[in-house]
Image: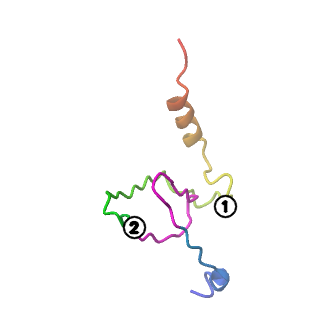
């Protein structure tokens, strides 16, 4: 593992508490672990994950994780349909 993932020793942990009405966005490819529970008042609780297509292995860029323009084109077609 050390030879393949040499920077693993430099990894640090971040802890985040997400409260009711908030959301946490994690960029594609970020490793994470989630512990989820309801509030102390016994209110309802739901955890929701939405996965887009994982980044292309060859892209190698944080700000451009895909080598094709499929996802930007798909988003544009759904979010801003062509007017008549």
As displayed, is residue 70 above or below residue 41? above
Point out the tag, 2 or 1, that comes first from the N-terminus: 2
Towards the viewer: 23 or 63? 23
The secondary element bearing badge 1 is classed as loop
Q: In this figure, which residue is indicated by the disc labeled 2?
A: 36
Q: Position of residue 14 (x, y in %)?
A: 59, 73
Q: Position of residue 80 (x, y in %)?
A: 55, 27
Q: Position of residue 32 (x, y in %)?
A: 51, 70
Q: Quadrant of residue 56?
A: bottom right
Q: Do the numbered discs 2 and 1 sit on residues whose CB atoms are within 8 Å?
A: no
Q: CA distance from mark 2 to mark 1?
A: 31 Å
For the N terminus, the quadrant is: bottom right
The secondary element bearing badge 2 is classed as loop
Q: Closer to us: mark 2 or mark 1?
A: 2
Report crowding for label 2: few under 14, some 14 to 19, many 20 or more residues within 10 A (C-alpha). Answer: few
Q: Is residue 28 magenta?
A: yes
The kind of secondary structure the magenta stretch mainly shows is: loop
Q: Quadrant of residue 9?
A: bottom right
* Left or right relative to 82: residue 37: left
Give the magenta part as a residue range: 17-36
Instruction: Find residue 26 and name its label.
Output: none
Q: Quadrant of residue 3?
A: bottom right
Looking at the image, the residue that sits furthest to the top is 84
Q: Which residue occupies 38% across, 64% down?
A: 39
Q: Which residue occupies 56% across, 73% down?
A: 15
* Left or right relative to 41: residue 54: right
How many discs appear? 2
Looking at the image, the residue that sits furthest to the front is 41
Q: In this figure, which residue is indicated by the disc labeled 1?
A: 60
Q: Which residue occupies 55% across, 20% down?
A: 82
């Amino acid at each position: 593992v050390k030879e393949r993932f040499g920077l693993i020793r430099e990894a640090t942990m971040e802890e985040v508490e997400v409260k009711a009405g908030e959301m946490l966005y994690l960029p594609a490819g970020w490793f994470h672990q989630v512990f989820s529970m309801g509030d102390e008042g016994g209110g309802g609780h739901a955890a929701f994950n939405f996965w887009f297509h994982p980044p292309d292995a060859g892209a190698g860029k944080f700000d451009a994780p895909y080598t094709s323009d499929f996802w930007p084109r798909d988003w544009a077609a759904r979010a801003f349909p062509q007017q008549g």
